[in-house]
Amino acid sequence: MVFLIKILDGKPAIGDALPSEQVVRCPRCDQTYRFSYSGEEWYKVTAWLKKAETVMRESHNHDNHELDTLELIWRTGINR
């Protein structure tokens, strides 16, 4: 599991129970997010972070940037 949760007043807007986390900043503004992931995802963190950056940037083109969470989806050749 992977979550991208908006940080408001220094705290995540909603909680999650995932053990690992990093703070990431939107590439288009000063908004920060809590990027958290489960132990099963540790080996894909670099790829997830690239996907998170894309999702944050693209959310500016929609009203999604105002949401507390942004959706991250891992697509494989089977899911396309």
Image (tube, grey):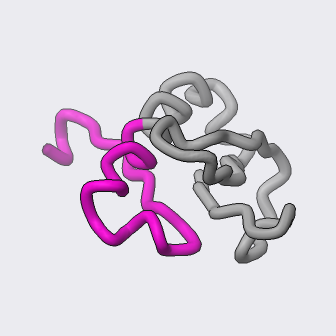
The percent coordinates of residue 23 (x first, y second) are 75, 43
Residue beneath the point at 72% across and 74% down: 13
Q: Is residue 19 left or right of residue 75?
A: right
Residue beneath the point at 62% across and 53% down: 31
Q: Is residue 75 left or right of residue 41?
A: left
Residue range of the region highlighted in magenta in the rendering: 54-80
Q: Nearer the viewer, residue 27 or 4?
A: 27
The answer to whether 51 is drawn above or below residue 31 in the figure is above
Q: Could one spot residue 64 in this view of the protein?
A: yes
The percent coordinates of residue 29 (x first, y second) are 53, 45
The percent coordinates of residue 48 (x first, y second) are 51, 35
Q: Is residue 10 left or right of residue 3?
A: right
Q: Nearer the viewer, residue 72 or 25?
A: 25
| Quarter of the view holding residue 22 | top right
Quadrant showing the N terminus: bottom right
Inspect the magenta stretch and tell me whether residue 47 lies in it: no
